[in-house]
Amino acid sequence: MSEGPITQNEITALTRRFEEMEQRLTGLSQTNSIQLAMTLGERHAAREGRINARIESLETSLKQHIDHRNAELVEALSKNVGKCPNAE
């Protein structure tokens, strides 16, 4: 038995369903894009926070090391104040 021709009402209904599905897919795509952008932004901010914390830690360590070396230099120079540089 052969199928009859598609009626105008069926074509209209199929077209409407197609357009509804297309809108839903577009909405899902936009939602996924927004979620992806937010996730990437959060990851970037977290990574940036860790990097900044590490830089601050290194700066603190470097300052402490410089202060320690400066103290050693001051101590060494203080021991030699008033001594003749050519005397043994």
Image: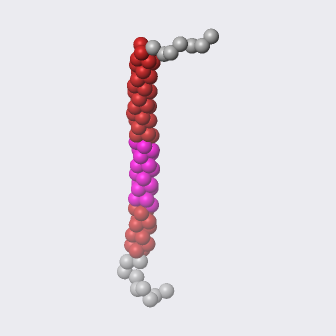
Query: What residue sits 37% from the left and 77% below the top?
Result: 81
Above or below residue 82? Residue 74 is: above
Single out the residue that lies furthest toward the right: 1
Question: Which residue occupies 39% across, 72% down?
Answer: 78
Q: Nearer the viewer, residue 55 or 84?
A: 55
Q: Is residue 17 magenta?
A: no
Q: Nearer the viewer, residue 69 or 38?
A: 38
Q: Is residue 51 above or below residue 1?
A: below
Where residue 76 sits in the image (x, y, percent)? 43, 72
Count all numbered tags in the image, as a single digit: 0
Say if residue 53 shows up in the picture. Answer: no
Residue at horizontal 42 percent and vertical 85 percent from the top: 85
- Is residue 63 within the magenta segment? yes
Corner quadrant of residue 18: top left
Query: Magenta segment, which residues?
Result: 44-65
Q: How is the image coloured?
A: secondary structure
Residue 7, can we see it? yes
Quadrant in the rendering for residue 34: top left
Q: Judge whether 47 appears above or below 17 on screen.
A: below
Question: Quarter holding the N terminus?
Answer: top right
What is the x, y in percent for residue 59?
41, 56
- The residue lying at 40 percent from left, 31 percent from top is 30
Relative image position of residue 51 (x, y in whole percent): 44, 49
Coordinates of residue 87 in the picture (x, y in percent):
46, 88
Among the 4 quarters of the image, the one containing residue 45? top left
Instruction: Residue at the far bottom: name it.
Output: 86
- Camera-side residue: 82 or 74? 74
Query: Looking at the image, which residue sits at the far left?
Result: 82
- Type of secondary structure dominating the magenta stretch: helix
